[in-house]
Image (cartoon, rainbow, N blue to C red):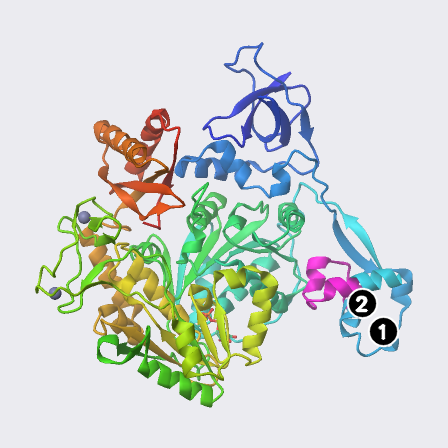
Amino acid sequence: MSIVRVALDIPLSTLFDYTVSEVVAVGQRVIVPFGRRLMVGVVMECVATTDMAPERIKSVQQVLRDSAPLSVGLLDLLRFCSDYYRYPIGQTVLSALPTRLRSDKPVISRAILSYRLSASGAALDLDALPKRKVVQRRILAKLAEQPCNLAQLKNLSATAGKQLKALVAEGWVEQFSLSPSPSPACGGGEQKHTFDNAHTLTGEQQQAVDAVRAARGYACFLLHGVTGSGKTEVYVHLMHEVLLRGGQVLLLVPEINLTPQLEQYFRSRFSDVSLISLHSGLSEGERLHNWQQAQAGTAQVVLGTRLAVFAELPGLALIIVDEEHDSSFKQQDGLRYSARDVAIFRANQRGVAIVLGSATPSLESYHNAQSGRYRMLKLTGRALAEARLPAMRCVNINQTVMHHGISENLLREIGQRIARKEQSLLFINRRGYAPVLMCTGCGWLSGCKNCAGKMVLHLNDQRLRCHHCGYQLHVPHACPSCGNADLHPVGSGTQRVESVLQERFPEARILRVDRDSTRNKRAWQAMREQIHANEVDILVGTQMLAKGHDFPALTLVGVLNPDSALYSSDFRAAEKLFAQLVQVAGRAGRADKPGEVLIQTAFPDHPLFHALQTHDFEGWAASQLAERQMAGFPPFIYQAMLRAEGKNETEVYAFLNLARAAAVEMRYAVETLGVVPAALPRRANHIRAQLLIQSAKRKDLQQFLRAWQPLLDAIPSRQIRWSLDIDPLEF
Ligand code: ADP
Ligand code: ZN
Ligand code: ZN
C-alpha cells in the first residue's frame, strides 16, 4: 500500500490523499471516490505517510492507463501557475487538460494512424489515374516516398482527408497504427523536411534569425517589426532550424479565427512536417487527439491559442508568441493566466528560446526589452520594397457635417471607393469603455483630483466615480472649467452606421462582421471568401476585423469612434487603441493599391494620432511609459485585483471592505486602494465591485497575496462570487 496525493477539480487549495495498491506514476490519471461521487484526478505526489486518520482514508478506485502520465515538468508548470495566479491546484491541473482527459469515462483515444501504399496501390500507374484527381495523385506520390500521418497529408491539400478516405476505400492505401508512446519519438536525431525557402531574408530579418539561433538555453526576444516587415518569415526560418534538429515548436496566436489560415500557411511552407492545432474551436475528440500527438512528440509544430501553452511538448525547443500584446492571451475567468507570461516561464523552465512578436509590443514587454531583461530585435522596414505604409488622416468631427456618427468626408471617400470597385472598412471601437464626461466647449475631461485616473460617469445615480482610487462626486451641472452646460460622454453613438450607409449607397453591398458573426467557423470562412471575391463594398466591424486578414481590394479604413479610448478610465485604453489602429491600418492597401486611413476624432492634435501618422511607435511608447511611471501604473508597478459580485449590494461591498481592512492590517509592502464599482457595475442583476492592490515589487505582492488569500477564504460570503486576478488587464 502506498499513498498518493491527488489533484481534483475542487475549489480548495489542497491535494487529496488516497491509498493505492498498484504501482502508480506521478502524473497518472486516477478515478477516486470524493464524497458520494467518483472523480478524475491527477497523481501529483507519491508519499509514504499522510496526516489523515487511517479509518478515513479511501483508496483509488482505478488507475487510468489509457493515456500516458503527465510529465513532471508540466506538473511543475501548473504548480507555478496555481501559486502565482492564486487558483486552487486541482482546478489548475484539471483545467489545463483536454475535456476528454477530465472525464471519468475511459478515453478511447484514436491511435495516431499512419498511412502507406497497399500492394495494389504500389503497383498502380499514377498516369493512368484521371487528370482531375489531382489531390489523390499527390497523396499517392507522397506515400510512395514514405508513410505519412493525416497531419502531414493535409499539407498537400485541405481536402486530403476526404480524398484519403476514397483511396482507402479503393484499397490502394492502408492505415496502420502508431500508438502514442510515452517516450518522445523526437529529440536529438537529425530530421529532414521539405522547406519552402521562398524568400531571401532581408538584412534585419537575418540578424533576428541569427540572434535567436545563437542563443544557448533560455533567452527571451522581443521581435518588434512594423506590419508587413516579415515577422512571419522570421518565424518560418527559426522553425526550420529547430525542425532540422528534431525539436518541437510551440507557436501561440491570439485568435481561433486566425488559426485555420495560419495553419494552411505553415503547412504550405513545410510539407512533410507534422503540424497540429490546439484551440477551443476543435471538437473534444480532435483536441484530445492533437494533444496526444504533441505529448507523444509526433507533432513537430503545435499551433494554438492560449490553452496550447499547457500542451505536453517533450521535444520543446522554441516558443513563438505572435501578436504578443494581444489581450486575448489573458484568460478572463477561472485560472486567469496570461499565456504569454506562462510561455516565458515555460521557456525559462525548459531552457529554450522564446520570441515575442508584434508591430505594437505591450508596454510591459517593450519596457523589459529596453531594460535589457529581454533582447530587442527590430524590423524597421517593410519586407516588400513596393509596399508602403498607409497614409493616415484625422477628420475633426467638430468641424464637419456628421451623419449619425459618420462624417461627410468619410462618406465621400467611401463613394469614390465604390466607384473604383475597391473596398472600404469601417472600424467601430466597441470595447465596453466606461464613459468619461467631456465639455464640448473647452475640452475639459472629468479627471480625478486624487490620482491619474479619469472619473467614470454613472448615469443611474448621476455620479462621477474614480475606478482607481474610489473618489466620487455628483455630476456637475456645468463645466467646472468654463461654465458651459453642454457636457457629454466622450465618443458615443455609432448605432445607426449601417442605415446611414444604406441610405447613402442603396446599391452597395454591406457586410457586418463582429464576434457573433464570426463565431461560426463556416460562416466566417464564407464571409472571407465573399470579401476576397470582391462581392462586398463596405465592411462594418469591430476589432475582429483588425487582425491579420489580408483583403487585397481593401483600400480605405474609416475609424469611427476612437475618442472614448483616448480619455478612458482604463489606463491601458490608449495603448490598446494604438495597437488596434496600427493593426486595422495594416489592412488597407496591402496589395499594389495604396491604402488610406481616415480617423474621425474630436482631438486631431492628440499625440496618439500624431505618433500614428508618423509611424512612430518608439516615441509613443516612450511618452506612455513616462506617463505610466509618473502615475505609478504598470509596468512600473505590479497589480492584483479582487473582484466580487452578488445580488445584494450591501453584501458585496461588506465583503470587499472586510477584505480591504484585512489587507491594511497586514502591513505588507503593498498599497491597498479603495473599494470601487466595476467598469460594468451591474451585470445580469448582479452588483459588481472591485479592490486593487499594488506593489513596486512582484515578490512583495506575491508574498502578500499568499498571506491574504486564507483571510479572504475565511470571510463569510455565501451569496457572493469573488476572484483574484493577478496582473489584471481589464478594469
Ligand atoms: P508581418 O508578419 O511582419 O506583418 P509578413 O511576414 O506577413 O509580415 O510579410 C509581409 C509580406 O512580405 C508577405 O507577403 C511576405 O511573403 C513578404 N516577405 C517577407 N519577408 C520577405 C523577404 N525577405 N523577401 C521578400 N518578401 C518577403
Ligand atoms: Zn468647459
Ligand atoms: Zn482617483
Residue 224 visible, this angle: yes
Q: Which mark is residue 299?
A: none
Nearest the camera: 230 or 623?
623
Look at the picture and state if 37 lies above or below 324. above
Identity of the residue drawn at 45% across and 76% down:
383
The quarter of the image that holds ligand 2 is: bottom left
Identity of the residue drawn at 38% across and 67% down:
495
Identity of the residue drawn at 81% across and 65% down:
144
Q: Are marks 1 and 2 in contact (CB under 8 Å)?
A: yes
Regarding mark 1 in the picture, which secondary structure is present there? helix
Task: Provide the residue span drawn in magenta.
Answer: 142-164
Look at the picture and state if 91 lies above or below 351. above
Q: Position of residue 123 (x, y in %)?
A: 91, 67
Whether residue 144 appears in magenta in the rendering, the answer is: yes
Label 2 near ligand 1 (CB < 8 Å): no
Q: Which mark is residue 126?
A: 1
Look at the picture and state if 430 lies above or below 468. below
Q: Position of residue 417 (x, y in %)?
A: 43, 86
Look at the picture and state if 489 lies above or below 415. above
Q: Dot 2: within a 10 Å radius of its alpha carbon, few (fewer than 14), some, or many (20 or more) residues?
A: many
Q: Amino acid under label 1?
A: Leu
Q: Amino acid under label 2?
A: Leu
Residue 238 visible, this angle: no
Identify the image quadrant of the N terminus.
Answer: top right
Residue pointed to by mark 2: 140
Q: Name which of mark 1 and mark 2 comes first in the sequence.
A: 1
